[in-house]
Amino acid sequence: MPGLFDPITVGAVTAKNRIFMAPLTRGRSTPAHVPTELMIDYYRQRAGAGLIISEGTGVSRRGLGWPAAPGLWTEEQVEAWKPVTEAVHAAGGLIFAQLWHMGRLARPDVTGLTPLSSSATRAPYHKEPNPYAEAQAASLDDIARAQDDYADSAVNAIRAGFDGVQLHGANGYLIDQFLRDGTNRRDDDYGGPPENRIRFMRESVARVADAVGADRTAIRLSPNGESQGADDSDPESVFLPAARALDALGIAFLELREQAPDSTFGKTDVPKLSPQIRAVFHRPLVLNQDYSVETAQRDLASGVADAIAWGRRFIGNPDLPERFRVGAPLARDNPKTWYTAGPEGYTDYPALEAATV
C-alpha cells in the first residue's frame, strides 16, 4: 500500500512524495502580470512538496482577469519565471505551471476586454456592484484561438523551466464553463449532450499534449457541486466521459477538487465522483480539499487516490511535508494577507526548525 512519503511517477517526472501543493492565487505579480523576485523565495520555501502546482497563470490578456496574477504569454513573463523554477529545482523540488483562462470570470476592469465564455452569460457575485460582465459566446474562431493560447503558454512554461503544465478546468473557469450545462447553452458541436460539452476540454488538452508531451500535461477538474455560478444537473453524465477521454490522451495526472457538505471552501450535498472516476481513469489521480494525514493515508491505501494535494495548509506551513512526517503542529495562516502585496503573510511564515527555536 503506498504512503504519503513514497515516491510516485507522474508522466515524465518522479515526485519524491505524494504530498502535492495545490495551486494558490496569491496576487504577488506586477500589474502587468510579471512574476516578481518575492515569488522566488515563496516557491523555494515549499519545494519539499512532491510536486508544486503553481498559482493560476494566465494564458492570455483576455483570459486573465485577476489583479497581480502572473501570466505566461509574453517574453518578459517567461524570463521572470525562470529564476522561480530554478530555485525550486535547486531545492530539490518539481513544479508544474497551472494554465488559467478565466472565461466569464475575467474582470473587464482588469483586462479592459469583454470576457469570453461558452455562452453569453454573466457570473454571479456575492455583493453589488458585480465586477463581472456578460460574456461573449465563443465563436469557432474564438475557440481555436483559446486553444492556441493554451498550447502557446504551455510551450512558454517549458521554456521557463517548468516540469510540466496543468490546465485549470475547475472552479467555474473557461473549461468548466464548457463542461457544465448550467453555463453551456450552445446548440453546436461544443454544446448540448455531454459528448459535445467535453469537446473543448478534450481538444485543449490534446493541443497542449501535442505541444509539450502528454507526459508533461495534467488537468484539474471540480466535478461535484456549484462553483462560482457554474453547475451541472447531472455531473456524472459529463465528468465520467471526460475522465475516460483524459485517460485515452495519456496525460500525466488528473487532479480533482471535490466539495462535501462540511467543506471549508464551498459546500455541497452532491456526492463525490472520485470513486467512479477512479474506475475509468487509470493514470495517477490526485485528490484535493480538506484532507488530514489520516484521511489522506486512507484514500491512498484504498486506491481511490495516488497522491493528495493541499492548498491553504501550504500557506502557513512552507515545510508542510516535514510537519506531517514528524507529527508537528500546523501553523495557522492569515486570510487577510492571502492577496495583499509584499512579504507579510507570504514568505514570512517560519519553517518548523526556526519556529521551534
Image: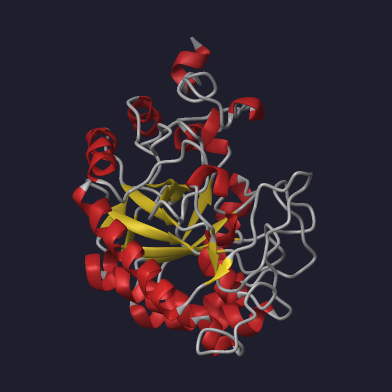
Rendered residue at 47%/58% (across/down): 101
Between residues 27 and 274, which one lies in front from this camera angle?
27
Residue at the limit of the structure toward the top, as seen here: 357
Rendered residue at 56%/76% (across/down): 277
Rendered residue at 32%/49% (across/down): 72
The quadrant holding residue 334 is top right
The quadrant holding residue 331 is top right
Q: Position of residue 251 (x, y in %)?
A: 35, 71
Q: Is residue 85 left or right of residue 6?
A: left
Between residues 46 and 294, which one lies in front from this camera angle?
46
Is residue 281 in sight in this rendering?
A: no
Q: Is residue 110 left or right of residue 276?
A: left
Placement of 12 over or under 19, stated as above or below: below
Q: Position of residue 81 (x, y in %)?
A: 28, 39
Between residues 91 and 16, which one lies in front from this camera angle?
91
The quadrant holding residue 133 is bottom right
Q: Position of residue 254 (x, y in %)?
A: 45, 66
- The type of colouring in the image is secondary structure
- In the rendered picture of this protein, how many numbered marks are placed on residues? 0
Q: Position of residue 203 (x, y in %)?
A: 39, 78
Rendered residue at 39%/64% (across/down): 218
Placement of 33 over or under 96, stated as above or below: above
Placement of 340 over or under 184, stated as above or below: above
Q: Is residue 314 left or right of residue 36?
A: right
Is residue 206 in sight in this rendering?
A: yes
